[in-house]
Image: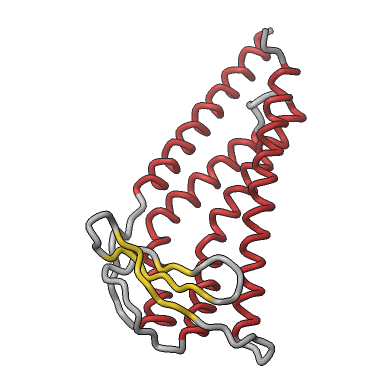
Amino acid sequence: MMGPSFFSKRATILKNIFLVILIGVIAFNTYGLITAIRRITPFSNDNTYEVSFVTDSLGNELATRIDSSEPGPYVQITANIMEPTDQFIVDTSHAVSRITVIGVLYRIPLMIVLWFAFLIFKDLSSTRTPFVPELFSRIKSMAKILFFYGLTGTVIFSLLITFFVTGIVRINNPINFYLILIGFILHFVSEILEYGSTLQTEVDELL
């Protein structure tokens, strides 16, 4: 039988999972920022860069990929730019640094969503009930972030790449419908939980 103790254990497991994911994302982005800053300082090594293109099975170019001789993940400009390019408004090392910084900024809303998810399951692991006012507001905050992120995130990313890296204004698939859908679902879930909380309060008052 699933009682409060079982519910609390499941919430604790999910809390720990989101915490590990959040720490991993923060560590990866911090490493990216440190690497980006070091590449444009006098302390930077004499790295070489190779610009290539990510292609599909038919050989169509989908994205620009930049590999560095320095150990670390490669940099990729996704298909948000309709036509991949190897022409940048700055030298390649500065282009790599700028893309990295823009990529970190682009992920900030997702890190905030992960933080909210961690807080939600942290509270659930201790309260043992989903009918908590703070829970509703946090789920709604996640829903709003995902909705606006899905609506504007790609456009903002592409414009930043345009102004600071390529100088080419080309935007493809500007709306992320999956994130928008998830935002709507989370908002709907919060409304259901809030309504359930109201009913539970009314029942308690009658008793």
Give the side of residue 60 with respect to residue 24, left or right. Answer: left
Q: Is residue 134 above or below residue 30?
A: above
> Residue 12 occupies which quadrant of the picture?
top right
Give the side of residue 53 with respect to residue 110, left or right. Answer: left
Q: Which image quarter is the N terminus in?
A: top right
- Which residue corresponds to the image point at 42% horizontal and 61% vertical from the top-left? 153
Q: Is residue 39 above or below residue 134?
A: below
Q: Position of residue 143 (x, y in %)?
A: 49, 44
> Residue 188 occupies which quadrant of the picture?
top left
- Which residue corresponds to the image point at 54% horizontal and 46% vertical from the top-left? 142
Give the side of residue 205 with respect to residue 178, left or right. Answer: right
Numbered circles on residues, count: 0
Colour scheme employed for the rendering of this structure? secondary structure
Q: Is residue 15 above or below residue 66?
A: above
Q: Is residue 104 above or below residue 204?
A: below
- Which residue corresponds to the image point at 73% horizontal and 24% vertical from the top-left? 9
Relative to the observer, which residue lies in front, 113 or 36?
A: 36
- Which residue corresponds to the image point at 27% horizontal and 54% vertical from the top-left? 57
Q: Which image quarter is the C terminus in?
A: top right
Q: Position of residue 135 (x, y in %)?
A: 63, 36
Relative to the observer, which residue lies in front, 22 or 132?
A: 22
Residue furthest out toward the bottom: 42
Relative to the observer, which residue lies in front, 170 or 62?
A: 62
Q: Position of residue 192 (x, y in %)?
A: 50, 27
Q: Position of residue 8 (x, y in %)?
A: 73, 24
Relative to the observer, which residue lies in front, 39 or 129?
A: 39
